[in-house]
Amino acid sequence: MSQTGSISMVRAKGLRKEHGRASGLVRAVDGVDLDVAAAETVAVMGPSGCGKSTLLHLLSGLERPTGGEAWLAGKRIDRLSERAVARLRRHSVGFVFQAFHLMDELTAAENIEMPALLAGSSPRAARRRAAELLERVGLADRVKHLPSALSGGQRQRVAIARALANDPMVLMADEPTGNLDSAATVDVLRLFEELHLAGQTLVIVTHDARIAATADRLITMRDGVFVDETRLTGGSTGSLSALAGLGS
Amino acid sequence: MGRILLICRVVLRDLRRKPVEAALMLLAITAATATLALGFGLSGAISQPFQQTRTATAGPDITVQTYTPGSGPERPPSATQLADMAALAKKPGVTGSSGPFPASMPMLRVNGYNVQAVVQGRTAAPAGVDRPEVTQGTWIHGGGAVVERSFASVLGIRVGDTIRLNGRAFPVVGIAVTAAWNVYPVDTFQNQYGPAGVVWLTEADARSMATASQPLFYTLDLRLSDPARAAGFENTYLNAYQNDGIDLQSWQDISADDGRVLGKVQNMLNIASTLLALFAITSVALLVGVRMADQNRRVGLLKAVGGTPGLVAAVLLAENLLLALVSAAAGLTLGRLFAPLVSYPGAGLLGAASSPALTLGSVEEVFGVALAVAVAASLVPALRAARISTVRALSDASRAPRRRPLLIRLSTRLPVPLLLGLRLSARRPRRSVLSALSIMITVAVLVTVVTAFSNAGGQLGPVVVAPASPKNLRPEHVVLAFTGVLVALAVVNVVFITWITALDSRRPLAVARALGAAPHQVVGGLSAAQLLPSLTGAVLGVPAGIGLFTMVSDHSGVVYPPAWKLAATVVGSLLVLGALTVVPARLGARRPVAEVLQSEAV
Amino acid sequence: MQEVMLAMLAKEPSHGYELRARLRAALGPLGDSMNAGQVYVTLTRLEKAGLVASERSDPAPDRPDRKVYTLTPAGQQRVAGWLSEIGWPKPDLAEFHLKLVAAAAARLADPVALVDAQRRELLRRLREAQRAGMAEPDGSSAGLLLEGIVLRLQADLRWLEACERTWAARKGESGS
């Protein structure tokens, strides 16, 4: 891989995932090829039930594919034991969920410390990292708050900070703004934009156009397959002022 | 009427919805009530049969024995001793006598046992005082032996068997009961020989059993004009004749010694039932707690359709009370079934082996305990459910886990499985305390057994003698059976709690796995969540168990088992527990992360 | 545009360059497309129509432009009328909708492909507007305008989703 300029962080080849059997067979992901370069942001859009969440689970090793290959940070993961995938995931993937999935009984800082502790960091280092990340997501004053005392947007920012705790090579987000109102969505967008500028590789699965629009590349998925792929970096044909009605 | 119907319907539905938990609860309370019923059944089991036997066998008011006085070697009885006996039979107040009969202490070999026996030489004709009542076969004739019933019962001797006394074979021609001797295995001879069982032979055969080290001695049975004053008679003449080597025993002494055997068993059963009741409370409280956790929604629904707080509390209580009543009935039945087996030492007495009657009082008490267990375990949750606001009950499916900042801080310094385990057990502190308690009780009992065995070399306390017949349930069997029941309940409890914890913490554990916790760490965490409180319980169980043994045993000098044995008990229990938790934990942790997170997402 | 200039003069008489600065502050990056000439052309037109009056003020040393514009009573009336007017830009959806219908009917093009192409374009615009909006400081009025653009684009994208669903379903029916 070293000969190519951009390293592939996430790669899928003919990736398939089927649920059920015989007549009840559902092809959630049906032969998908994907290559996400380092520092790239890729969004996968599609109607609900198109298999985009399953794809994300396959790419992060949370689920095992029925067929095809999944690579993470240069390592093939579809054949690894769950234990090995867990170890790889600790350092390579940060996960952000639609439902936040924060631990209710842990404070914001403690939630963020979790992955670092799981990866064997010292408590002191984990705490320092958590403070740093809370600062970065703009919640430095919420260190000791329990999730129940935080707004939805704040919770998701804590979850993002948690996903970043081990400096993952890839940040994967599954409908990160699905449970948020538009103001909170903007906060998360801003955060993703900053991460993007800092060179973080991001794979986002969403049906929110706003979050999809932060991506360099947008993939549209339908019925388990990719039906469209566009670079959004090219720029649009019209001018913004025209959109605002200032053209005349 | 409608309200009652509603309560019944809701209660039955819920029981059907959660059959495993209902069954576990039944099991726990039944075990406690059965033990309790057994204990009650035994009280009074001995005094009545003794009187009955005394009357039927013309039991003596005083028995007299000769023995070798001083500290020299054993000698045959002297002329003085025989003269003393003759004098005693003529003392004022004495209205009748039998004997002196020759007696000796041979070893009896039968069915693979080799135990101490006491042989009394008797004539074929019945004596005036102490006429052993033959319950099977015939009285001694033609060189045959008659064996005392409790002794025969322990050793499994039947009419027609052949026993060997000091190597000589005797056919057993009969089984009889007597009130002149203690039932087996009461230690009649004050630790000189250990307990000895009674065998009647002809006088000639009894004499022939004497050896140099176990010489002949004589026994004499006296009847007094006033049996109630036997103790006074005993004291007076014991002082006068003990320098000659004459021992007297009143019938009250014999009765009391007999009673001590059963009293001991009864005492054990009382302690056992108390422990089982405590255990039942902890496991019932656990089950109720687990059930309440997902009952909030039901409570909310009941309230939303117009249920008053009283109705809600009634529903929750009724369910557990129903289980308690069924368990109490089952416990009483089991107690009655097993009582004859436990009260076996009464085999030496007439009418004792039949199942002891349960008095109304004891039935009431058994039901009372069962209901108390149910109420103690479910009152707090029921009241809480009655008080909770409808909206809150409807909105959260279960009680939010508790937060323990100190434990969370502390856990960051531990390896991952312990970190997860500590946090999991901190989420449900009440559950942790209760499981610690149940483990404590179990370990305490195990320690008691270990202590007992190291005290008596395979015997439980002074009550129990070495040879054990597989055909009879004996005190140590009772204790072992009880321990078995307790351990089995503890096992079921632990497996169940682990399974519940695994279900309950599916989401946090799935998140932990998504964050990079490996499956084995999650399984380790779930096991640790059980083991951490269990460790506390097990350690506390050691002093509790030793205390318990000291209570049960009437030995003043209790020999404590070596530390390694205690440590092995604790470590062994924990290892077994750990192994037991792995299966439910694995099952609980096996569900794919993605599926869990998806199904629980809003 | 004329009404906007008038309304901005309603506060106080202003120089042309002041008006332009105010406009730029309100429009943020969108105001970049507006050159100084446009402002003066509009002001001249308004003066001819008798809606504003101008007079020369004291010459400032660094400003070549010394005219100060004031609203005339007619201008004030016009502003009041404009403010009470209820107008809203009409969304032009019919054209695209008919395009899809026609393309499908005549089998000229795949309507789903047309939707996809349109969506790509809208997403690019959304991206631009969103980035511009995020570059604005919190609470800036230009940010608010950009937020409006983003929300409209989102609404359009949602409609495109509905179009896609329907046309994909119709295609499936006719195909089988």
Image: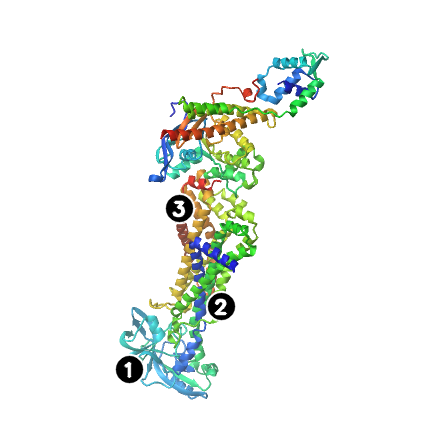
Mark 1 residue element: loop
Q: Residue at x 67, y 10 (%)?
A: C64
**Is label 3 or label 2 in front?**
2
Q: Residues within 10 Å of mark 3 (few under 14, many from 20)?
A: some
| Label 3 chain ID | B
Q: Residue furthest top?
A: C64
| Label 1 chain ID | B
Inter-mark Cα distance, 1 to 2? 51 Å
Which of the 4 quarters of the picture holds residue A230?
A: top left
Any part of residue A217 in sight = yes
Residue under label 3, please give it: B586
Q: Position of residue B157 (x, y in %)?
A: 31, 73
| Label 2 chain ID | B
Residue under label 1, please give it: B141
Indicate the amino acid at tag 1.
His
Q: Residue at x 35, y 83 (%)?
A: B101
Q: Are marks 3 and 2 on the same chain?
A: yes
Indicate the amino acid at tag 2.
Glu
Q: Position of residue B402 (x, y in %)?
A: 53, 47
Any part of residue C127 in sight = no
Q: Nearer the viewer, residue B70 or A175?
A: A175
- Mark identifier at residue C149: none
**Is label 3 or label 1 in front?**
3
Q: Position of residue A233 (x, y in %)?
A: 47, 22
Q: Position of residue B466 (x, y in %)?
A: 36, 67
Residue under label 2, please give it: B364
Left or right of B448? Residue C62 is right
